[in-house]
Image (tube, helix red, strand yellow):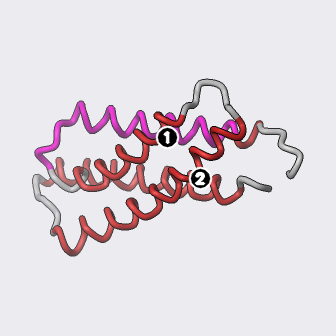
Amino acid sequence: MKYRHLEEMTRGLLEYNRQAAEAYHHCRKTGKQSDFYKEVKPFADKVKAMSEEWEREAVQWVDDIRPKNLYPLQIKNTAENLQMVSIRAFFSNTSLKKFKGHIQSIEYILERILEEIKESKSPDQ
């Protein structure tokens, strides 16, 4: 399948998004901030690398397939939001409402992409 790598990266980013949500809830519960060099930076670096590659492929996919209600700007914003939450997840003073909104927005876009890839009837499958 032509978009197998995009699908794999999308699933990986969904997992990172869930890990960020768990880290955030743990930080809020304990009130402790994570060590920047041991926890925050390694996680944020992994998310940044994958989200940048994912963004390039996802924008190309949107241009090729033209899925309903998915646009390149949404892809760009989702990649940026992923990178932001991958850092803010480790700080208990991050606004719950904003953080939760970003997590839900990211999840929605990633799930929509997975649905569209699944439904896509491209000739190369």
- Residue farthest to the top? 69
Left or right of residue 121: residue 37: left
Binning the other alpha carbons within 10 Å of mark 2 as few (below 14), some (14 to 19) or many (20 upward) gives some
| Vertical side of 79 occupied by 19: above or below | below
Query: Which label's residue is closer to the chain start, 2 or 1?
Result: 2
Q: Residue furthest bottom?
A: 38
SS under mark 1:
helix
Q: In the rendering, at what x and y percent does residue 54 appear?
A: 53, 54
Q: Image check: 110 left or right of 82?
A: right
**Picture coordinates of residue 76 (x, y %)?**
44, 42
Badge 1 amino acid: Ile
Q: Quadrant of residue 103?
A: top left
- Residue occupied by mark 1: 75
Quadrant of the drawing holding the N terminus: bottom right
Q: Depth check: 111 or 49 in front?
A: 49
Q: Is residue 63 magenta?
A: no
**Disc 2 to disc 1: CB gap under 8 Å:** no
Q: Residue at x 17, y 68 (%)?
A: 36
- Magenta residues span 92-116
Q: Distance between the Cα atoms at labels 2 and 1? A: 10 Å
Quadrant of residue 116 within the rendered picture: top right
Q: Which residue is mark 2?
A: 57
Numbered label attached to residue 25: none
Dominant secondary-structure state across the stretch colored magenta: helix
